[in-house]
Amino acid sequence: MFVGHFAVAFAAKRAAPTVSLGTWFIACELVDLIWPLFLLLGIETVRIAPGLMAFTPLDFEHYPWTHSLLMCAVWALAVGALYWRRNRIAAAALGIVVLSHWFLDAIVHRPDLPLAPGSDMKIGFGLWNSVPATLALELALFAIGVGLYARGSQPADRIGRYGLWAIVVFLLLAYAGAAFGPPPPSVAAIAWAGLLGGAITATLAYWVDAHRKMRA
Ligand SMILES: [Zn+2]
């Protein structure tokens, strides 16, 4: 899942408007931002296997530290703890957004998401076997999320107005590249693209969100 995660981030901004959209972006993708680091360090592994599933050429061999249900809950608690003293509603919502990543991934992945490190019990409902079904679900979620954010806020200036659409276009282009582009050349390329893409989207979101006001 890719743009579906960002749908949750856009929508969650409404729950705790004082938290920047950039922070919501990091929360929704947190485990996918740690994953490239763990790939580069050799702690987790992925294999490039074109044809394995219709939507993705990636075989997620081993990623219990970022993508097991238990560890997603641990990452969620860690993020919640960071925010707890500042704002409890925001802390709880951020934790839920971090944890939502696992459940959204479970819809699309084949059964490769472990319940806990060391567990043989793996979950995944395999929507990625169908490109049209994947696109329909993720684009619908994304449209709802962006709509909630766009209607719940108003641009303070031109950066706030056009920047939002720049983020939307950037995410959709990255999504189209992943869906219809060639398989990545190497695992290192996956990792660096993930880190760079995450940094760009979060930076854009902090910048644009600072130029929009939430409606009362
Ligand atoms: Zn993921």
Image: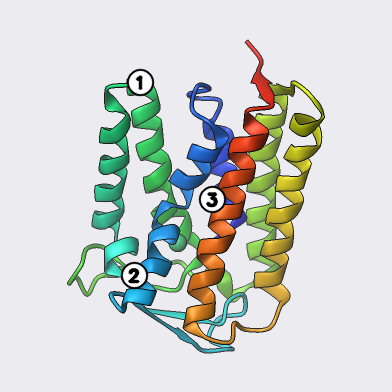
**In this view of the protein, can residue 26 be seen by the observer?**
yes
User: What amino acid is at disc 3?
Assistant: His
Label 2 beta carbon less than 8 Å to ligand 1:
no
Indicate which disc, 1 or 2, sits on the residue closer to the N terminus: 2
The secondary element bearing badge 3 is classed as helix
**Above or below for 124 versus 171:** below
Q: Ligand 1 shows up in which quadrant of the image?
A: bottom left
Residue with the mark numbered 2: 38
User: What amino acid is at disc 1?
Assistant: Asn
Query: Can you give x and y, in whole percent of width and height, for residue 62 in the image?
Result: 32, 77
Q: Is residue 139 left or right of residue 104?
A: right
Indicate which disc, 3 or 2, sits on the residue closer to the N terminus: 3
Q: Is residue 85 left or right of residue 199?
A: left
Label 3 beta carbon less than 8 Å to ligand 1:
yes
How would you rate the neighbour count of disc 3 (Cα within 10 Å): few for under 14, some for 14-19, many for 20 or more?
many
The residue sitting at 52% across, 44% down in the picture is 25
The secondary element bearing badge 2 is classed as helix
The residue sitting at 72% across, 25% down in the picture is 151
* Spatial separation of the CA atoms under disc 3 and disc 2: 20 Å
Residue with the mark numbered 3: 5
* Spatial separation of the CA atoms under disc 1 and disc 3: 23 Å
**In this view of the protein, can residue 62 be seen by the observer?**
no
